[in-house]
Image (cartoon, rainbow, N blue to C red):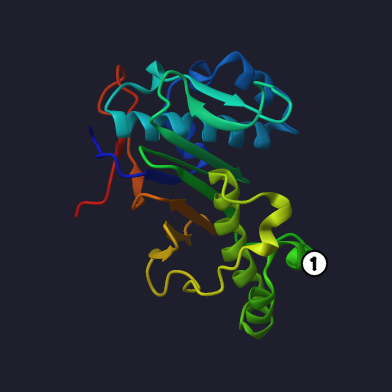
Amino acid sequence: MGASGRPWAVVAGTDEVLELVPAPERLLTGAERRRADAMPGPHARADFIAAHVLVRLCAARLLDRPADALVLEQHCPGCGSGEHGRPALAGLPQVSVSLSHTTGVVAAAAGRAPVGIDVERRRLPDGIRGAAGRVLSTAERTAMREHADPDAYFLRQWVRKECLVKLGRTTLGGLSAVDLSGLPEGPDGSPERLSQHGDLYVLDHTDTRRDAVAAVVSTGRPRIGALYPPAGPERLAGLEGPRT
């Protein structure tokens, strides 16, 4: 495999992903195209498409196969819909995938261990800290009040907990019952920082170029790679990782 079985993640600009792949919508299923067309405006639509392309690129890198050979499925266990829910690769139950998108920035991950990823812009919407009581534990709320940058603290915990939701470790209604106050605040002078919470690895990522914050959480040791042009038009798995 091109990147071993370790969870493999990428954070990239929406435009970077869409410019990398000719006719990116052709990779999407009919359900994905319907959801893309329902997005509120062209920019949100582009973010959705880019995230759904990027998750295929991450899986293609992991599996060493063309991205256009991979079919992304979603299934909601609550209502049974195939239009939303946790993403998976058709016919590949041993591979875990996750994706996220915000304004102009997308993130995705794939691995042979369960993995969740989330990305957000560092500029929080007005009033978002009002959600702290529903998102943060008692210890986290105390730490946020004492923090030099409360918004940054809240955002770091938010992306981590979004990953836990995607892993099925908690629900949106149970976020405040999860206490991550013992984890480091995030990268300190470097783009990434890896820590552990129980059986989970937590990889914090700060993307100053795109003004975004991301987290990758997995039972395997995750890594974040870079997006590069594919070697040829016949293969879309154009990803390389850090040279270590």
How many marks can you see? 1
Q: Residue at x 39, y 32 (%)?
A: 95
Residue receiving disc 1: 130
Within 10 Å of the Cα at label 1, are there few (<14), some (14-19), or many (20+) other Cα atoms? few
Q: Residue at x 51, y 75 (%)?
A: 182
Query: Quick check: 154 left or right of 238?
Result: right
Query: Quick check: 130 left or right of 11?
Result: right
Question: Residue 156, relative to residue 1: is it above or below?
Answer: below
Question: Residue 185, relative to residue 29: is it above or below?
Answer: below
**Mark 1 falls on what kind of element?**
helix
Kind of residue at badge 1:
Gly
| x and y, in percent, of residue 168 in the image | 57, 44
| Quadrant for the N terminus in the image | top left
Query: Quick check: 77 left or right of 65?
Result: right
187 or 198: nearer the eye? 198
| x and y, in percent, of residue 28 in the image | 53, 19
> Which residue is the extreme one toward the left?
244
| x and y, in percent, of residue 242 in the image | 26, 51
| x and y, in percent, of residue 4 in the image | 24, 39
Q: Residue at x 43, y 21 (%)?
A: 22
Question: Residue 135, relative to residue 7: is it above or below?
Answer: below
| Residue 76 sits in quarter | top right
206 or 156: nearer the eye? 156
| Residue 124 sits in quarter | bottom right
Q: Residue at x 38, y 16 (%)?
A: 69
> Does the image show residue 105?
no
> Does the image show residue 242?
yes
